[in-house]
Image (tube, grey):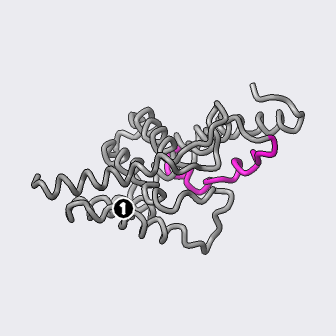
Amino acid sequence: MSPNELQGCLAFLREAERLKNVHRSAHTSAGQPESTAEHSWRLCLMAMVFAPQFPELDTARLLKLCVLHDLGEALHGDVPAVQQEQGTHKSAQERADLQTLMQSLPPALFDAFLGLWDEYENASSAEARIVKGLDKLETILQHNQGANPADFDYGFNLGYGQKYMAAHPLLQQIRAVLDADTLARQQQQQEGGKPR
């Protein structure tokens, strides 16, 4: 690696650090706002835990997609799932931000990373479809696990990301467990009780 390429890679990594400061609408179990970097970390962990159930898939590719899927949020932040609507420019903004974030990378790495992001965004491979499903499941898992405000909308979880569950029976199985957790949290909320 040339000195200029090394400096470019380090510049990219310094810029990517901004993702640690981007908060999502979810809360951790300690009541802290969850960062996008924390979400991406646990998504990677989910992919590793369940990878043996997808023997036909490329595990390294799964992890690369997990790491890159929300990286564009480092510049303009996250749009909470409950606020996302059809016709918004979220995808275009994230892609443009990712390109800005990666401008110091060597061209081959820039192209490879952008290609992986596009693959995820368009769900154009079996790996991307699994990561899309796991991404939604990780969000629901966090919603159910978080120390959320009293008015948190657990009902949102029940419809969120359903279209991605068809990618694999395991996603449907995980979803059934998480939906049961959501219903329990919703019931506790309605009864004014504290989550267990």
Does residue 129 appear to the left or right of 109 in the view shown? right
Q: Which residue is mark 1?
A: 101
Q: Nearer the viewer, residue 192 or 181?
A: 192
- Using the rendered view, name the quadrant where residue 193 is placed: top right
Q: Is residue 39 above or below residue 99?
A: above
- Give the magenta part as a residue range: 150-169
Q: Position of residue 33 (x, y in %)?
A: 62, 42
Q: Position of residue 156 (x, y in %)?
A: 72, 51
Question: Which residue is rendered at x = 63% and y = 56% of the image?
Answer: 81
* Secondary structure at numbered mark 1: helix
Q: Is 161 left or right of 59, judged from the image as shown?
A: right
User: Which three-letter amino acid code belongs to the residue tagged 1?
Assistant: Leu
Q: Residue at x 36, y 67 (%)?
A: 99
Q: Is residue 133 above or below residue 55?
A: below
Front-most of residues 97 and 39: 97
Q: Position of residue 94 (x, y in %)?
A: 47, 65
Question: Is 161 a magenta residue?
Answer: yes
Give the tally of numbered discs: 1
SS majority, magenta = helix
Mark 1: give few (<14), some (14-19) or many (20+) Cα within 10 Å: many
Image quarter hosting the C terminus: top right
Residue 52, image x and y in percent?
39, 34
Residue at the (68%, 57%) spot, across then down: 82
